[in-house]
Amino acid sequence: MDFDFAEHHQLLRQSVREFARAEIAPHAQRWDREERFPKELVSKLAAMGLLGIRIPEEYGGSGLDTTAYAICVEELARIDGSMALTIASHNGLGTGHVLAFGTEEQRRRYLPKAASGEWLAAWALTEPGSGSDSAALRTTARRDGQGWLLNGTKTFITQGSVGGFCVVLARTNPDVPKQRGISAFIVDHGTSGFSASKHLLKLGCRSSDTAELTLENVHVADSQRLGEVDRAFMDTMRILDRGRISIAAMALGLGYGALDMAVRYAKERKAFGKPIADFQAIQWMLADAKAELDASALLTYRAAWLADQGRPHSEQAAKAKLFTSEAATRACNSALQVHGGYGYVREFDVERHLRDAKLCEIGEGTSEVQRMVIAKHVLTG
Ligand SMILES: Cc1cc2nc3c(=O)[nH]c(=O)nc-3n(C[C@H](O)[C@H](O)[C@H](O)COP(=O)(O)OP(=O)(O)OC[C@H]3O[C@@H](n4cnc5c(N)ncnc54)[C@H](O)[C@@H]3O)c2cc1C
């Protein structure tokens, strides 16, 4: 896209692009088929600085901004949605929550290990009975001596079974309106009663780890509580505002990646004696995808820029995620169509991009939820 990124952002884009081409592209199809999170990649992701993108250098991270975070996710997604999702959720959700609301002690304990890849981060808000209506969660945390006792089930949790720690949202006060009685806790993997009970098989993003988590009388010290008691729901909304920028960036990368494949293929494939790129029907698919993705990039990087200025970006992040995720699905679908039958078989990457892109319309708030956020701003603005 023609966009005037700062030089350090351009250099970052170039280096992540080269990394993704060298270290991920040769394996992405196989990992997807095996439906396995590639643990062997973690040390390489860490060495590239991708596991501590926004973590300040004093905690071992790269200390970069939201724009840089979006660039990293976009570049990974051009090659592989699964690794883009891993990086988006590790940096934005689990690690992001500790970074934004953790005590100094919590930051010192968790952030260096997150940046080095020793501990991947998970973040558990969704439950079997509550997703969009996330404040209806039923996991409980009751006072237990000096600490807390957690009970409940979480589902669809990224890095759920491969993470080293998990930020868990739980109800601490059932007697107040549902948004006002929720607290956050950091639970280390290996804590008694905390287990990943089910590895979930998915349509796309198959080599990103997604698990159901069970908490059975999990005791955590009060020092593991993250943020104020009963106030975590508002913190959660702020985490999701920034997280949505990364899901928009993921969709953008998937869309551009599929478009690149379609352009290449359209120039090579011949029908009726000429390259299919000569047919207007094909050209229009490419043109629509390019126009929609460039518009998506503007929305996404505007939201990132606002976040970097410390300015409100909830509405802009919702618009970026809504528009970009739907545009990416359309772009991937058109790219598959350009490939004809070859698009439908697994030897080509385009079908994987389409499967991966669909998640962006669902994770971190569905398109319907984004419309609710935008409508609230439209009606009250
Ligand atoms: C691969 C994957 C990874 C994920 N990773 C995580 C993670 O790491 N941590 C985490 O906490 N969660 C995670 N999620 C969960 C995700 O955020 C939820 O799936 C999502 O928020 C939707 O919730 P739900 O699945 O319960 O759908 P529901 O809320 O049950 O929605 C079902 C349908 O109803 C619609 N709907 C609901 N309410 C309304 C309304 N008021 N108006 C109009 N339509 C409505 C929805 O838009 C949707 O179309 C992940 C999900 C997936 C698939």
Image: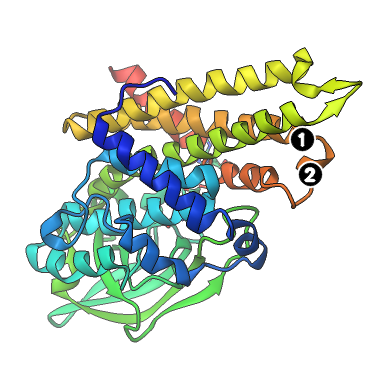
- Mark 2 neighbour density, 10 Å: few (under 14) some (14–19) many (20 or more): some
The amino acid sitting under disc 2 is Tyr
Residue at image coords 69%, 45%: 351
Label 2 beta carbon within 8 A of ligand 1: no
Above or below, 188 relative to 69: below
Image quadrant assignment for residue 378:
top left
- In front here: 29 or 292? 29
Residue at image coords 46%, 71%: 39
Q: Which mark is residue 344?
A: 2
- In front here: 18 or 297? 18
Q: Where residue 229 appears, x then y in whole percent?
A: 16, 60
Residues tagged 1 and 2 counted as in contact (Cβ below 8 A): yes
- Marks 1, 2: nearer the viewer: 1
Image quadrant assignment for residue 108:
bottom left
* Residue found at the far bottom of this picture: 192
Q: Closer to the N terminus: mark 1 or mark 2?
A: 1
Above or below, 272 relative to 347: above
Q: Where residue 337 appears, x then y in whole percent?
A: 76, 32
Q: For the residues marked 1 and 2, what is the alpha-carbon distance in whole angstroms? A: 8 Å
* Residue found at the far left of this picture: 104
Q: Which mark is residue 112?
A: none
- Mark 1 neighbour density, 10 Å: few (under 14) some (14–19) many (20 or more): many
Q: Which quarter of the figure is the C terminus placed in?
A: top left
Q: How is the image coloured?
A: rainbow
Q: Secondary structure at mark 2?
A: helix
The amino acid sitting under disc 1 is His
Q: Which mark is residue 339?
A: 1
